[in-house]
Amino acid sequence: MASTETLKKAEKFFELNELPNTKAMLMKAATTSGKKPDTKTQAALLGGRVKEVRFDRDWIRAYNAVCGFNDADISLTAPQVVSTSLMMYLLSRKEHPFPMLGMVHLRNHIELIKPLEFGTRYELVVTIGETRDIPQGKEFDLNTEFLLDSEPVWRSVMTVLNRVKGMPKLANKPSTKPTPEAGLASTDAKYIQIKVPENQGRKYAKVSGDYNPIHLYEQTAKFFGFKKAIAHGMWTAAKSLSLLEAELGVSAKTFSVDFKQPVFLPSTSSLKFVASKRGAKFELLSEKESKVQFVGQVTV
């Protein structure tokens, strides 16, 4: 059974015998486009559980290869991808009032509590958290846990945004003068160049099952308002983590990332980081405009 803390977050819970098919969930996502949330809409507090999930060794090798991890171990970000279809199942339910298309991935925090192993049967639980109002719309968390003997061994919190018109502005209006990113001290920072090819979205989709059209081709991305196709956020995050782990010489225990700007396909970015004995703080910068694409930190 899942932990009591996880279960009590959900007002309605669904038991599944196996993970949903990701491609089928993508097709179902298209059917949510008719949902029209307003300023009073709240996310449905849904939960889902698959009692037996095992990590496939061949899939992990393929995932590690496309993200840059060098070995066949279960990388820190892999469980997030494995759990995606269960998330999509909940988000596409009729009880959930927000459309899936156009949903924005804001940030992620991932924590490894105990090492994950091949052959072990884990319980997977995903819950949708309470809604928070922000000027851009409505944000809420997707809470994920892999459990063994009712104890969490891996967990994540993914925050997503649905844009809603007419949201109230902040009570304390910030200064009109733009506030720069805090940034990392350049004197202590190192840089790693990341070249992202035009077909990176299709390569990652083949492994992850995430065939969202904004990641595949320029033509399909333009249909959703992007000038070019954009890289999957979880690919750029995982790619950066793989490079940081190689630099640190040890696997990460926690990984946090806050997405700021999309990574277009093709493009070149620079991973700027400052390492310490405890881990590293990092930024991903677009090479042309030096825009901050995401910021985060790793602990080891």
Image (cartoon, rainbow, N blue to C red):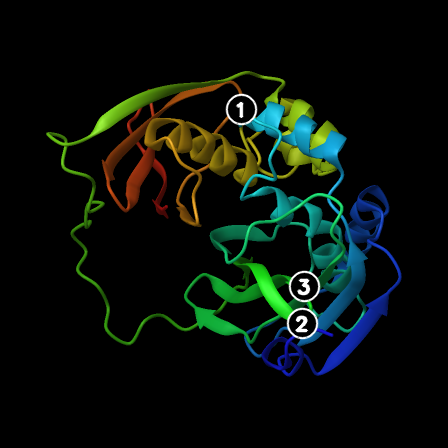
Q: Residue at x 61, y 40 (%)?
A: 74
Q: Amino acid at mark 1?
A: Asn
Residue 213 shown left or right of residue 254 in the figure: right
Disc 3: which residue: 148
Residue 240 shown left or right of residue 19 in the figure: left
Residue nearest the observer in this picture, 91 or 97: 91
Q: Residues within 10 Å of mark 3 (few under 14, many from 20)?
A: some
Mark nearer the N terminus (1 vs 3): 1
Q: Residues within 10 Å of mark 1 (few under 14, many from 20)?
A: some
Mark 2 vs 3: CB contact within 8 A: yes
Residue 223 shown left or right of residue 40 in the figure: right
| Picture quarter with the N terminus | bottom right
Q: Is residue 216 visible?
A: no
Disc 2: which residue: 150
Query: Which numbered mark, 1 or 3, is in the foreground of this view?
Result: 3
Q: Residue at x 61, y 42 (%)?
A: 78
Q: Residues within 10 Å of mark 2 (few under 14, many from 20)?
A: few
Q: Is residue 247 shown above or below 74?
A: above
**The label number, if any, that marks residue 214 in the structure image:** none
Horizontal and vertical percent position of residue 227: 53, 28
Residue nearest the observer in this picture, 49 or 108: 49
**The label number, if any, that marks residue 70 in the structure image:** 1
Secondary-structure class at tag 1: loop
Horizontal and vertical percent position of residue 234: 55, 40
Secondary-structure class at tag 2: loop
Q: Label 2, label 3: how many angstroms apart (C-alpha)?
A: 5 Å
Q: Amino acid at mark 2?
A: Ser
Mark nearer the N terminus (2 vs 1): 1
Mark 1 vs 3: CB contact within 8 A: no
Residue nearest the observer in this picture, 214 or 270: 270
Secondary-structure class at tag 3: strand
Residue 87 occupies which quadrant of the picture? Answer: bottom right
